[in-house]
Image (cartoon, helix red, strand yellow):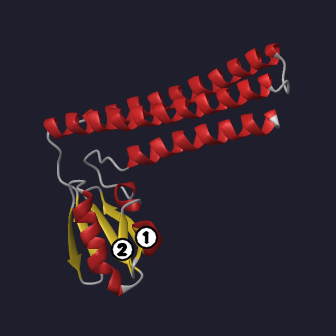
Amino acid sequence: MDIDVVIKNTKSGMAKAVEHTHEEFNSLHTGKASVGMVDCIVAEIYGSQMRIKDIAAVTTPDSRTIRIQPWDRESLKPIEKAIAAANIGLNPVIDGMVIRCNVPEMSGERRQELSKVANTMAEEGRVSVRGIRRDTLDLLKKAQKASEISEDELKRLEKDVQKLTDASIAEMDEALNKKTVDLMKV
């Protein structure tokens, strides 16, 4: 077993978990229109699941409107259905060859609700990172039992993996704090 590959895969997996959490946070709207709110919504087009950003141009002409212009006219209805089904607080309206979504003003109660959702997303990210840490430590312990690495090297690698874990979780917590501040702005 190549220990460098194991550590590299651990870094990569943790980075992906952090990136996924950031993408999840982008789907929460803060009262301002953002293309991230609809980017990752999946619509069924011609029998396959496709993300909106892959089948349409998504723009924000102003701070309260998201404009989606599909490249194929046949995609209008499936995209409208997918946005409505996503339950993100947007009401899609077909306007000729585009779909318009007006972003409603958020109440204080809705802001607190979204803050809780962001906390849940962050915790899921933390759990993912800790799972990657656990899997890596299991691999390292197997390598030590197979006499591929010494006990001292195992301890050093365990500390390195813990540092990676702490850094990834700290990055998620920082993103959560920023998102919470963003959500609570009136």
Q: Which residue is mark 2?
A: 44
96 sits left or right of 120 in the view: left
Q: Is residue 76 above or below residue 184?
A: below
Give the quadrant of the C terminus. Answer: top left
Give the quadrant of the N terminus. Answer: top right
Mark 2 surroundings within 10 Å by alpha-carbon count, few (fewer than 14), some (14 through 19), many (20 or more): some
Residue, x 66% and y 28% (percent of image)?
138
Q: Measured from the top left, where is residue 147 in percent x and y?
A: 85, 24
Q: Which mark is residue 50?
A: 1
- Sooner in the amino-acid sequence: mark 2 or mark 1: 2
Residue, x 15% and y 35% (percent of image)?
108
Residue 98 in view: no
62 sits left or right of 111 in the view: right
Q: Which mark is residue 27?
A: none
Q: Amino acid at mark 1?
A: Met
Q: Is residue 160 above or below residue 27?
A: above
Q: Measured from the top left, where is residue 36 in percent x and y?
A: 39, 55
Q: Could you say whether the residue bearing mark 1 is in a helix, strand or loop?
A: strand
Q: Is residue 140 above or below residue 125?
A: above
